[in-house]
Amino acid sequence: MAITFTALTSAAYGTDSQTYTTASVTPGSNRLVLVAVMNEPYSGTPGTVTLSGNSLTYVEIANVVYGPTALICRNTLFRAMGASPSSGAITITISGTGNKVCNWAVIEADGVDTSGTNGSGAIVQSATDRTDGGDPATLTVTLSALTDATNNAVFAAFGTDGAASVSPGTGYTEL
């Protein structure tokens, strides 16, 4: 079965908080849930992010801190999977002081490997890259070759300063 992706919810908030709540989502049984969170504090290094909700255990895949001194952000990507997830909101908790911005996207993938724990079997590799300013025309993240064109998929999450436009490359679809 081919892997399919469904966007469950996304939002952008410019409110001073350390806790944010997504809209209610209903993850499917044994489907991979991916949550990308971008946070920016008023000053200093962005706090670390944790998630809870849906009777799932959210495990961090990767996080990247990036940006020029005046605009430092953190992008964090999580995975989760369970046999009987519950419906409801996901709570995003950020350590440290208040945040100027918090954005998120919750994506569900069906047709993935359900072995391992909390979606670990569905994640074969991950990689990150970053730039700290300027006007990069491209940002390249290199992965090893996919071994099965039908049963492999690539998911990417990007954060920008808001002025940059992001377009999917050839063969990729924006969710």
Image (cartoon, grey):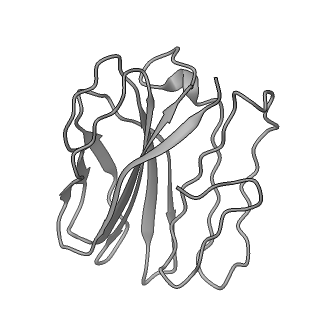
Q: Residue at x 73, y 62 (%)?
A: 169
Residue at far front of view? 1
In the image, 54: left or right of 110?
Answer: left
Percent x, y of residue 138: 73, 71
Residue at x 65%, y 59% (from the top left corner) = 129
Relative to 135, does residue 1 appear above or below in the rendering? above
Image height of 105 relative to 107, above or below: below
**Quarter of image, res 96:** bottom left
Q: Position of residue 114 (x, y in %)?
A: 51, 18
**Identity of the residue drawn at 34% across and 73% down:** 44
**The quarter of the displayed image where residue 74 is located:** bottom left
Left of 135 or right of it: where is 8? left
Tell how many labels. Answer: 0
Q: Quadrant of residue 28?
A: top left
* Quadrant where the N terminus is found in the figure: top right
Left-right relation of 118 to 5: left
Please state which of residues 39 and 44 is positioned toward the viewer in this rendering: 39
Q: Position of residue 72 (x, y in %)?
A: 44, 73
- Give x and y (percent) for residue 64: 51, 57
Q: Is residue 83 above or below residue 47?
A: above
